[in-house]
Amino acid sequence: MTAELVRGQNHTLPQTRLEIRVSAGSPVVAGATLGDENGTVRGVDWIAHPGAHRLPGLEVSRQAAAGHRLAVDLEALPDEVHRVTVLLALPTGVGGPTRFGATAAPFVAVTGLDGTEIATFTLTGLDAESAVSALELYRRQGAWKVRAVGQGYAAGLAEMLADQGLAGAAELAASIQEAVARSLARSVAPPPPRTPEGDRVRHASGPSDAHPPTAPQPQPTAHPPTAHPPTVHQPTAPQSATHPPTAPQPQVPAHPSAVPQPAAPAHPPTGTDPGTPTAPVAPTAAGPINYAHPRRQHAAPPPPPPAAPPAEPGQAPQPVAGDATGWSMDERLYNQIWGMFEDLARAAAAYRSAVDFAESRMGQELDRSLSDPRNRIGGTGDRAREEARAKRDELIARAREVLDRDLAQLAAEAAVVEPALPAAYAGWDNPVWHAHRIPMELPMALRIGDLHLPERTDLRIPLLVRLPLERGIWVDSGRTASEAAALMDTDRLRRLAMETAVLHAARLLAVYPPGEFSVHVIDPAGSAAGSLAPLVDAGVLAGPPAAGPGGVASVLAHLTRRVDLVQMAVRAGAADALPPDLDTGEQLLVVNDFPHGFDDRAVTQLRYLADEGPSVGVHLLMVADREDASAYGPVLDPLWRSLLRITPVADNHLADPWVGHAWTYEPPATPPGSRVLEQVLAAVTAARRAAGR
């Protein structure tokens, strides 16, 4: 039975291999400190945090998230450790809440590796605190117990670490927050929140004890009691709790006349329970009263996907495209892809931690055996080494067997899902593009590349971002640490970066309804004329590419004015008062070769567009080498962090929002010799003409 603890209460732990699961109302930093018999932290090497996430017997998340899984093996802790304190802190400088009183009460659960809850604790009563000691595991008379602490600190992480006796607490706290900011900048944004009913259908596989005690296991997230549900910030991909998405911003209608009306929506928004009671719809002054329930779907949801054929005994079920829930097939496929993404992340995490545990266990056994001088004589030491290596190899082989089974199932699912994807989700080599018609409604998401892990490089997960874009995109044209970039000359790398940006712009044009998306280009030196030729020849740009300082200033002034006017209209609730010459459709600004041609004023305007533009439909797609802008120093750091960085060649720089793996990003590319890009742009032009745009 689960023990629901209150502040100060303790409970005996029946096992030493544990998970500590954290659910919070907004992203938090999770860490843990090791204390001696007096509770003193002896140094920075006794603290697990996002910048140093692993210690012997302890592993924490590498980034801020609304949900965490901390892995603990109490038997693997050093003998001097008598206390493990779990810390939570709000990240600074990322635009989130600055005190726990402004968020939902964090919930902490101590579980076994199978997900069974041992003890839970809800941290109520927090107000001005920005850091809190949530709970502690402590050793008493040879047995381990857990105590609910809930001690908050208004001065934040530095005060909390100093309270545990750590010298240099302020410096360490600053470095932790800096590591969190870096991880948020490279992390793939999770999908928006959904209710637990939105989980996709899982392909169950048999249990295994090959998973190690030092890493999160691919188990379903245990939901806390309804008194403190964490589902407010659950991601679309099931069985995890991660970063919540950026707070929704008010969207401007595509045309000034399209002022929101009080009619009920045809489809409930994602994550909304159709049966949730809401305020009644006010009748309009003219026309009959609308008695429709504002959250009830007017039409029946689409039929479920075809059932998979029954599996043979002992075999995994056959995968089916669209096996997640949703109001449309596009939504089902979107949720299914995110489920595959998370499954692969957690399966790899379990395997990697199993390998680490096996190596650590072998080292401990060898140390114990060889510490006895008698074992150093004769063949006793050799036999001890052989036995330790055999145990390590057995553990790794069992973990690899589990991983291979999971990877095979995911590969089979990917083979079924990929051909069923709509154009917005499909790769350029998918035949769906040859029959593509410009849609009349905006799709849920857009594919901007593929992701894979070294455990199986041929298993690719589509990288989908929600539409409208919530953050800009930066195509890094500089030399990165990847082998592909190191083998390529600078000019070719820059050309590939611009061609990648053109493919993204073309895809956005192809999935937006006619006339509701415009593309502006800044090419100060005209160096990207060849790469931009498909867009220019098709006549899909809002105007000729802007060149020189004058062209840069003109385009930036135009888009800055649009952002200012639309923001004022949104605040005043007067969208119909916008000037008639203002295009209220979505806008994309493609910037090449930044900061060439940009003066200080232009740089400031670009930063403004990156920060304020997405909320009112102005998006940024930059092609730049960060080294070229090094003269600005840290002034531009917020700009780079606000953009999703991708590369024109394969590079392992992106992190998932669950366990923080470094994923290899593969940029989009058209098949060699294919004219699919020209065909798609021609379809965009024809659709605009037909719509009179």
Image: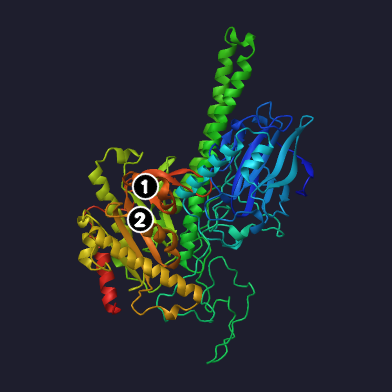
Instruction: Tell whether label 1 touches label 2 (CB within 8 Å).
Output: yes
Q: Quadrant of residue 230?
A: bottom right
x and y, in percent, of residue 57 in the image: 62, 33
x and y, in percent, of residue 363 in the image: 57, 23
Q: Is residue 143 left or right of residue 474?
A: right
x and y, in percent, of residue 272 in the image: 58, 68
Q: Is residue 547 left or right of residue 251?
A: left
Q: Secondary structure at mark 1?
A: helix
Q: Nearer the viewer, residue 130 or 478?
A: 130
Residue drawn at (74%, 30%) of the image: 38
Q: Which residue is mark 2?
A: 603
Between the residue at mark 2 and the residue at mark 1, the CA separation in whole angstroms equals 10 Å
Which residue ends up furthest to the front in the rendered image?
Answer: 600
Q: Which residue is mark 1?
A: 632
Way the structure is coloured: rainbow
Image label count: 2
On screen, 497 above or below 682? Answer: above
The three-letter amino acid code for the residue at tag 1 is Tyr
Sooner in the amino-acid sequence: mark 2 or mark 1: 2
Q: Secondary structure at mark 2?
A: helix
